[in-house]
Image: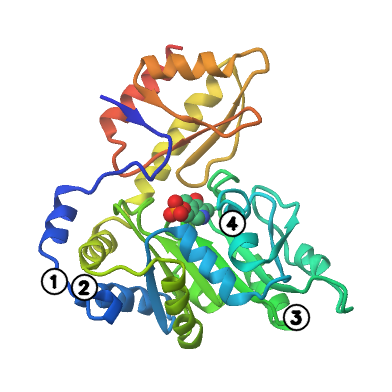
Amino acid sequence: MIIDLRSDTVTKPSKGMLDAMMSAEVGDDVFREDPTMNALEERIATMFGKEKALFFPSGSMANQVAIKLHTQPGDQVICDKYAHIYNYEVGGVAFHSGATCKLLDGHRGMFTARQVEEAISPSAYYYSQSRLVEVENTTNKGGGACWDFSEIEKIKTVCKTHDLGFHLDGARLWNAMVAKNETPLQYGAAFDSISVCLSKGLGCPVGSVLLGDEILMEKSLSLRKLFGGNMRQVGYLAAAGLYALDHQVERLAEDHKKAKEIGAVLAQLSFIKKVEPIETNIIIFELNDDVDEAHFLNQLLEKNIHIIGMGSGKLRMVTHLDYTDQMHDKLLNELGSI
Ligand SMILES: *Cc1c(COP(=O)(O)O)cnc(C)c1O
C-alpha cells in the first residue's frame, strides 16, 4: 500500500467516473458541438451565476488566459508573493501577457484591501499601470488557507473604484467553499473571472474551467485556441467533471477532517518544530533545525509514504479522494513510531 500525499492531483478516476466517461455522448468541441462539454460548461456557469464557462486542459492555462484578457503588455498584476500565477506558472505572466507582477507581502498567501490600495500605481505616464488584482483561494503555498469573504468584498470595491479587473485562481475553491460554508454564487458575484480546477479535490483526470461574462469569455475562446488549448471530442473529460460535481464535492469535508487529524499527530512529535494552521486539505510543517530533511523523507519512503518538500525547510502533505481510511490509520500509526 503506497500512501501518496504529495498532492491532491495524484487521484485516479473511480469506477463510477470511468463508467460515466465511457458512456459520454461526444462531438467536435472546436465546432462547439460536444453536448457533454456544453452541458458541463452551462452547469458550472449557472452554479456561479456567470454568463459563460470554458473548459481548459489545465489550471495554469485558464489563469494565463485570464491574465491576458485583463492586461496589455507593460501592465501590472497585483498579487500575493505566494501566488501560483507568479511562482509556479513558469513566468507566464511575463511570457504570455508581457505584464509584471506587483507582489504583496501577505499572510499565508492572503492580503488586505488596504494593501491593494497602497500598491496601485499612481497615474503618471511613466508608471506601469495596475490593471488586475489576483486572489487565490484556498492558497496553495499558504497551506490551504481560506480567505475571509468580507475582505474579498472590500478588495472588489477597491477594484471597482480604480477600474481594475479582479481574477480568482480557484484551483481549490471547492475546498474553501466546503470549509467555510460558502456558495459559488457569492464568488461569481465578487469576481470578473474565476478559474476552478476539476482535477484536484474533485478527482477528475484532467481539466479546469474559466468563468466570466459573455464578452470576456468570447475573447477567452480565441485565446484558448491561440494558446493551443482547443480540443475535439472532449465530452469524455466533461463527463468526468459532471460526475465529480454530483458525487465528489461534499466529501471534501472528509479530506479536511483527515488533514486536521494528521496535523494533531504531527504537532505531538518531538522533532517537529511547527505545524501551520490547517483549514482544508493541505498540511505544511517544519522539522527541528537539527533534523535532516532528506533522512526524514527517506524514513517515510521506506514506509511507502510519499510527501513533498517545498523548500526553506517546509514539508507538505495533501489529503485527497484516494487517501483511504485504511491509509489514514496506517499513516497516523507510522508517524507515531518514527
Ligand atoms: C494546481 C494549481 C493551479 C493549476 O495547476 P495546473 O497543474 O496547471 O492545472 C493553479 N493555481 C493553484 C493555486 C494551484 O494549486
* Label drawn at residue 36: 2
Q: Tell me if label 1 and label 2 are in contact, CB under 8 Å.
A: yes
Q: CA distance from mark 1 to mark 4?
A: 34 Å
Left-right relation of 319 to 234: right
- Distance, label 1 to label 2, CA atoms, is 6 Å
Label whose residue precedes the other's in the sequence (4 or 2): 2
Secondary element at tag 1: loop
Which residue matches tag 3? Answer: 162
The quadrant of the rendering that contains the N terminus is top left
Q: Nearer the viewer, mark 2 or mark 3?
A: 2
Q: CA distance from mark 2 to mark 3?
A: 39 Å
Where is 266 relative to 141, above or below?
above
- Residue at point 89%, 78% (across, down): 124
Residue 50 in the image: state x and y as whole percent: 44, 81
CA separation, marks 1 and 3?
A: 45 Å
- 219 horizontally vs 304: left or right: right
Mark nearer the N terminus (1 vs 2): 1
Q: Which residue is mark 1?
A: 25
Residue 180: give its label.
Answer: none
* Type of amino acid under label 4: Ile
- Bin the neighbour count of mark 3 within 10 Å (Cα to Cα): few under 14, some 14-19, many 20 and up: few
Look at the numbered disc 3 and say if its residue's Cβ is closer than 8 Å to ligand 1: no
Label placed on residue 85: 4
Q: Position of residue 175 (x, y in %)?
A: 44, 54
Give the CA separation, mark 4 to mark 2: 29 Å
Q: Is mark 4 within 8 Å of ligand 1?
A: yes
Locate residue 58, reporting x and y percent. Answer: 41, 58
Question: As shown in the figure, which amino acid type bears the numbered disc 1?
Answer: Glu
Identify the element where label 3 is drawn: helix
Label 4 secondary element: helix
Measure the C-alpha gap from mark 4 to mark 3: 22 Å
Query: Residue 281, can we see it?
Result: yes
